[in-house]
Amino acid sequence: MRISLNKRESTATAQNAKVGKQLILAGWIQEIRVMGKLAFAKLRDRDGDIQIVFFPDKFKNFKDLSKITRESVVSIKGTVQKSKLKSGGNEIVAAELEMLSLAHTPLPIEFLGKGIETDLSKRLDARFLDLRNPRIAAIFKIKERAIIAIREFLGNEGFIEVISSKFSGAGAEGGATMFEFNYFGKKAYLNQSQQIYKQTLMACGFEKVYEIGPSFRAEKSHTQRHVTEFTQLDLEMSFIDSEEDLFKLEERMLKYVLDYVRKNCKSELERLEKTLPTIKLPLPRVSYEEAIKLLQKSGVKIKLGEDIGTSDEKKVGALVETKYGSRAYFLTQFPWSLEVAKFYWMRNGKYGRGGDFEFMGQELTTAAQREHRYDMLVKQIRDKGYSPKNFRSYLDTFKFGMPPHGGFGWGIDRLVQQMLQIDNIREVVLFPRDPERLTP
């Protein structure tokens, strides 16, 4: 290569460099215009873009500029000067240009406008181009910062980050939504969550653990909030008094994440034209019965003992915001008879010891104190219509001393979707998987 990439600077550095400084840049040619004896190009990299100016007397290959196609990758050596654009800043007067990769034409999608010019399905087909849009890329920079915030918060709380297997011989909630595969002649599954492993670590005495990694659900769902592979924060902690210990941890963590992203992603939020909500602690605790009454009072035909569906969930969120002035709350005291109260929840009379964490009209997670007593757990498995023999490996963990514990699983993708109020969760997953999509 004629131009050494070892000395490459970013466009952000170039925009703040002194006039007259010589720089080497590299990136994508977003656009190029040749106008007689003058040519302009916009060079884009991860940090932004900058205008490149070409003069025939300073750039010897001027006649070849018209052969450069949009989205070609080039390296450029040039000198900084003040830009005459209305936006101000710097520009680069090119002395040398090296073609690193010539882009084919035409491009399969248009992807750089402020709005979205192409429907989502086609954009996902050409995700390699779609993700070049700085607005789309900003989503993933925010997602990364949210994960950093979670790790920072939990580290300060004394949690240990772990990495568990994604293969399992059984599921925590049965096999209806599990991906089955052949594991050397044995029936195996991709994990729905890391719950079995993190509960095992409670028996090991780790006390506070979390994992951020992929989980899988074989649901033939085509909603805007479901994908078959998603990133999840799974957390478990020992020696708790009740589910309230989990609620307090969750609300503090959400506030920490929102504050962290707000502070560290100002340019990304500005690019997306998004403002993050602020929350005030403690968040409201709304019982299932109160939620049903709020819905009934608003005209929704629903009875006690019925599950609150997705559309009604959003209505409850709006009603709670009106009543309590909060965009996040906990939905608690679910009757044990409801499906949401799983066999592994501890019971408190007719209620399960858990609750949904609702954020901006959607469930972010369900947290629950687990039943840690072996005999009671076996009974609850039967009460929920399952066979204990199908959970033998899981149950063995509880035979030899298990502390009181509980946990939850946050969907990281859904968290970001809700923070930024993005309609479709596929927008916040790099390469989303659903019942129809297995590539790219």
Image: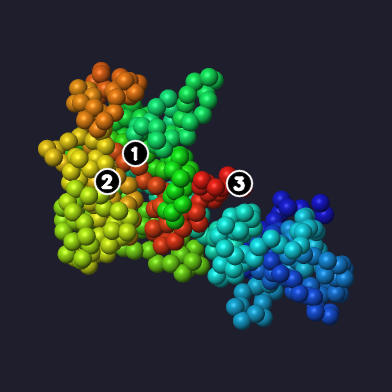
Per the image, label 1 sits on a secondary structure element best described as strand
Q: Specify the amino acid type for callout 2.
A: Leu
Residue 305 placement (x, y as % from top left): 19, 48
Q: Which residue is mark 2?
A: 249
**Which of these two is toward me, 52 or 439?**
439
Q: CA distance from mark 1 to mark 2?
A: 11 Å
Q: Nearer the viewer, residue 306 or 97?
A: 306
Q: Residues within 10 Å of mark 2 (few under 14, many from 20)?
A: few
Residue contact at pointers 1 and 2, CB within 8 angstroms: yes
Give the residue at mark 1: 235
The x, y position of residue 244, in whole percent, is: 20, 44
Q: Which mark's residue is nearer the viewer, 1 or 2?
A: 1
> Is residue 118 found left or right of 290 in the rendered image?
right
Identified by mark 1, the residue type is Leu
Whether residue 152 is visible here, answered yes or no, is no
Tell me if label 1 and label 3 are in contact, CB under 8 Å.
no
Seen at 30% across and 53% down, the residue is 309
Which labelled disc corresponds to residue 299? none
Decide if residue 101 is in sight here: yes
The one nearer the camera, 41 or 94, is 41
Residue 192 x, y percent position in the rendering? 41, 37
Residue at (25% x, 55% y) in the render: 329
